[in-house]
């Protein structure tokens, strides 16, 4: 769960829900999206269906949900380690004084490849006419 909308891609605002906390407070989740995390080596990993909760003060990772999504979480020697399906480490966090794991995640900068690439004039008109085939564009 995060309150950082800019960290999420492919946000589905129709997937709204209420989140109930241990002290019986509730917050509204205003959709879900995919979060792309940058590893230390520069490669990325995607966590799917992350809840967007704008009124949250801190981001939360729920271990049970991560395990259901195929991640492996190991807690030993006063540290938490998280691995992807290929057994590659995604993050490691030490146990803090208040017995929580404070994790420093760097969200990857995502940009649309179509917008980032330079396209020639034929492709531009192809897009403008709703992806009309090139033979019909030539006739026009």
Image (cartoon, rainbow, N blue to C red):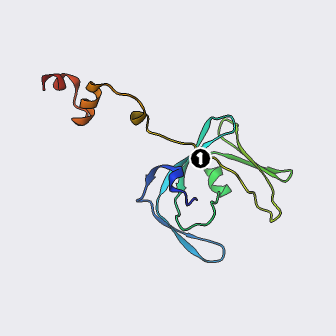
Looking at the image, residue 86 lies above or below residue 57: above
Q: Which residue carries the number 1 mark?
A: 107
Please name the residue shown 45% across and 63% down the image. Answer: 16
Residue 116 image-quadrant placement: top left
Q: Left of 28 or right of it: where is 92? A: right
Residue 125 image position (x, y, % from top left)? 24, 30
Q: Residue furthest bottom?
A: 24
Q: Left of 62 or right of it: where is 100? A: right
SS at circle 1? loop
Residue 63 image-quadrant placement: bottom right
Residue 5 image position (x, y, % from top left)? 50, 56
Q: Nearer the viewer, residue 103 or 72?
A: 103
Please name the residue shown 61% across and 66% down the image. Answer: 57
Q: Left of 86 or right of it: where is 128? A: left
Looking at the image, residue 138 lies above or below residue 60: above
Q: Residue furthest right?
A: 77
Q: Quadrant of the N terminus?
A: bottom right
Please name the residue shown 39% across and 36% down the image. Answer: 115
Residue 106 image position (x, y, % from top left)? 63, 47
Q: Quadrant of the C terminus?
A: top left
Q: Left of 66 or right of it: where is 80? A: right
Say few, some or many: other residues with alpha carbon within 10 Å of mark 1 (under 14 / 14 to 19 / 20 or more): some
Please name the residue shown 56% across and 74% down the image. Answer: 26
Residue 84 image position (x, y, % from top left)? 66, 41
């Amino acid at each position: 769960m995060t309150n950082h909308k800019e960290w999420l891609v492919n946000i589905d605002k129709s997937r709204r829900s209420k989140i109930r906390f241990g002290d019986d407070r509730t917050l509204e989740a205003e959709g879900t999206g995919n979060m792309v995390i940058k590893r230390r080596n520069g490669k990325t990993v995607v966590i799917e269906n992350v809840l967007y909760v704008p009124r949250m003060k801190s981001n939360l990772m729920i271990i049970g949900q991560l395990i259901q999504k195929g991640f492996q979480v190991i807690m030993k020697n006063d540290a938490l380690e998280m691995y992807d399906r290929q057994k590659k480490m995604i993050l490691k966090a030490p146990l803090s004084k208040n017995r929580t794991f404070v994790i420093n995640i760097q969200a990857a900068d995502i940009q649309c490849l179509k917008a980032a690439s330079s396209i020639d004039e034929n492709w531009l008109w192809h897009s403008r006419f709703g992806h009309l085939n090139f033979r019909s564009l030539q006739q026009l």
